[in-house]
Image (cartoon, helix red, strand yellow):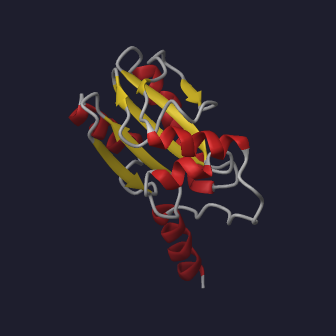
Amino acid sequence: MKKSIAILACAALLCGCAPKADNGNAATETEAAVEKAVEAPATGGLPANGTVHELTDATLYTPGVKVSNLTVLDFNAVWCGPCRQLAPVLEELAKEYEGRVTFVSIDVDTFGSLFESFNMGQSIPAVIVIRPDGSTQKYVGTGDLLPAEKFRAIIDSNL
């Protein structure tokens, strides 16, 4: 019995969580802004200042965005256990790569349309690494990102 529970717990950590289903409410202003932003990708983004930025403007990062430096988008939710495990690693790496890599935390409950626009599936945490040339790498779950050394190797290979 204990072995079965451990296997289920490991599977949940590797696979991630699924975002909460849409309850049928009309699109929020945030989702409307995302839909508009998806039509015309942004350029630039937030600074690489040693912190993990909480996204407040959906127009900053849309599919096809061009960034000034390597950028890590972390799609997550407060109710997601694997997301909570990844958060301190992001904070550690943001400090370590200050001035070189921008880290952005995106709440899927607030920015669900943005999450969907990146075609990441239904599981979180979901991480997108965006290079200045616009190319991306996508990771779902924590299997490729934890422990921190794995995530660090991904960043180093993209710098």
Q: Measuring 51% from the left and 32% from the top, which residue is drawn there?
A: 104
Residue 63 in the figure: left or right of residue 157:
right
Residue 120 in the figure: left or right of residue 32:
left
8 lies above or below 98: below
Looking at this rendering, what residue extends furthest in the bottom direction? 1
Residue 65, image x and y in percent? 38, 34
Residue 19, image x and y in percent? 62, 60
Residue 100 in the figure: left or right of residue 75:
left
Occupied quadrant, residue 131: top left
Q: Measuring 56% from the left and 46% from the top, which residue is drawn there?
A: 35
10 lies above or below 69: below
Q: Measuring 52% from the left and 64% from the top, which residue is drawn there?
A: 122
| Screen quadrant of the N terminus | bottom right
Occupied quadrant, residue 101: top left
- The residue nearer to you, when weighing 157 against 43, is 43
Q: How many marks?
A: 0
3 lies above or below 137: below
82 lies above or below 103: below
Residue 87, image x and y in percent? 56, 40
- The residue nearer to you, when weighing 23 against 106, is 23
- The residue nearer to you, when weighing 17 against 21, is 21
| Screen quadrant of the C terminus | top left
Residue 34, image x and y in percent? 57, 42
